[in-house]
Amino acid sequence: MDDQLMTERRVDAHEIKITARGVQVYYGEKHALKDVDVDILANTVTAFIGPSGCGKSTFLRCLNRMNDTVAIARVEGDIRIDGEDIYDSRVDPVQLRAKVGMVFQKPNPFPKSIYDNVAYGPKIHGLARTKADLDRIVEESLRKAALWNEVKDRLKESGTGLSGGQQQRLCIARAVATGPEILLMDEPCSALDPIATAQVEELIDELREKFSVVIVTHSMQQAARVSQRTAFFHLGNLVEYGNTSKIFTNPDDPRTESYITGRIG
Amino acid sequence: MPNSEHIVSGFDRDLEGIQAQIMRMGGLVEEAIARATEALETRDGEQARAVRDADRAIDALEEQVNDEAARIIAQRQPIAGDLRTVLTVFRVSTNLERIGDYAKNIAKRTETIIESPPVNGSAASLRRMARQVELMLKDVLDAYIQRDVALAADVRARDRDVDQMYSAIFREYLTFMMEDPRNITTCMHLHFMAKNIERMGDHVTSIAEQVIYLVTGDMPDDDRPKQDATALSVGPRT
Ligand SMILES: Nc1ncnc2c1ncn2[C@@H]1O[C@H](COP(=O)(O)OP(=O)(O)O)[C@@H](O)[C@H]1O
Ligand SMILES: [Mg+2]
């Protein structure tokens, strides 16, 4: 891995992948996300941190319209990916989610073979015309998820038989298989042991080459290790957003410092 | 930086503990400077010897502080202001230990030069210069414990006076040596002592910079022009 400051500086030149302006989310009466403005860069790992219930997952789910599936949720504001309004009525949320992949806290492979877990998305999106095409996508995806060498001889075995860390990388392979440009990860390591966590973190750093990665994490050390940009949320507000090394060495807002140093707010 | 308490109260105790040790070290070092220069002025070999012995306590404290700070890093993984507190402890303890070494070196030279007759008027200006550094050290320790950036900046500025005093002393000793070659050995020792005090001032300045970093997160970057006339003269360099 490069020196963190150098990496961050290089990232400065990356173009903006996601633009969010004035984003509000309500769950019924509850105002869960308040007027969030943020630009997320391409080929950059962006970490969302903040106390439980501050709206990190809510904002993450806005980015691939997962909130559409929550009946009482109402999203306002403007969110654009590569300049295109993802809430435009002409956008198909299913297509959008192929472009904006998501990995969840608990590894959730389908109760199917390793192969089918990865092949499922490309199949339903019609990304492979032949069996050979599909084989290639499965292999590439598993390679990108740093899992190929461990499973190449047992692709027919069930995905649920893998270790927790392998299952999570399988879910990453599954998300990668539909050819997304953005990967959203909601606490992807919280159910993993330290070794599996280290492998996933290493993977996240590699994924940055091809994807814009947004990761929600409760581990300050993890945010500091894997990301180049960090956003701190508090009570539904985006309090501070900036270079990770700045946030973790000398944050501007006292609320950020209290939270990351484990102080009573 | 927020000074509210940590949720884990042991962390607060850890951070307070290492800072208290820094203050204890600082106290010992202040005393070492004062006693070393007094021993020089009063030509008191016994006191010089005592200063040398006392340096061991300073070295031991430095080791303790560094072990403790390393443990805190491993155990608590401090970040932001907490991290700066721990990093600063490492650096300040090193600075203090070095100042202690210079005081010890002055004591050692004192034991040597009191074997020869005194060079009239030579110790007084050294004493003045040491007094200046001692006051700077006292102020910088206050600035450290009170997180007082203005006071730290003031200390930093005052190091220029020490540099000027050093240049003046250097010229004074050159004169003594030219007046009477029998003064040369003693004056060489005195000159090295002056250089030691000048270096103490640099370490105090470095502590002042650490205080500024601790509070603001940024090191002061405007270069202080070094006032050292001897750089242009021919003379023993250390
Ligand atoms: N489906 C939902 N229905 C109602 N309230 C919700 C729902 N999801 C989240 N919330 C509320 O919105 C706020 C933000 O939640 P969330 O985005 O999950 O926070 P985080 O991920 O930061 O822990 C919380 O107060 C939570 O209770
Ligand atoms: Mg969440």
Image (cartoon, rainbow, N blue to C red):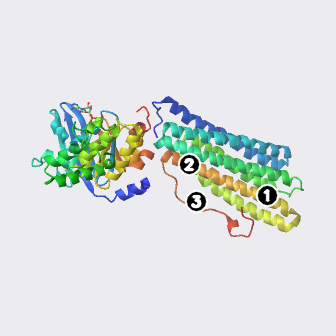
Residue A58, horizontal then vertical, whole percent: 24, 38
How far, Cα to Cα, is label 3 from label 1? 26 Å
Q: Is residue A26 above or below residue B143?
A: above
Q: Are marks 2 and 1 in contact (CB under 8 Å)?
A: no
Residue B87, horizontal then vertical, whole percent: 54, 45
Q: Judge from the rendering whether residue B111 lies leftward or rightward of residue A118; answer left or right.
A: right
How far, Cα to Cα, is label 2 from label 3? 15 Å
Residue B148, horizontal then vertical, whole percent: 54, 43
- The kind of residue tagged 3 is Arg
Secondary element under disc 3, as helix, strand or loop, is: loop
How far, Cα to Cα, is label 2 from label 1? 30 Å
Q: Chain ID for label 1? A: B
Q: Is residue B52 above or below residue B13?
A: below
Between discs 2 and 3, the one toward the N terminus: 2
- The kind of residue tagged 1 is Leu
Task: Point out the quarter of the image occupied by ligand 2.
Answer: top left
Estimate how packed mark 2 is, as few (under 14), some (14 to 19) or many (20 or more) residues with alpha carbons within 10 Å: many
Where the N terminus of chain A falls, by quadrant? bottom left
**Residue lying at 85% horizontally and 49% vertically, measured from the top left:** B43
Q: Which residue is mark 2?
A: B210
Task: Specify the farthest residue to the front.
Answer: A153
Secondary element under disc 2, as helix, strand or loop, is: helix
- The kind of residue tagged 2 is Gln
Q: Which residue is mark 3?
A: B224
Q: Judge from the rendering whether residue B38 lies leftward or rightward of residue B90; answer left or right.
A: right
Residue B190 badge: 1
Secondary element under disc 1, as helix, strand or loop, is: helix
Estimate how packed mark 1 is, as few (under 14), some (14 to 19) or many (20 or more) residues with alpha carbons within 10 Å: many
Callout 3: CB less than 8 Å from ligand 1: no
Q: Is the same chain shared between marks 2 and 1?
A: yes
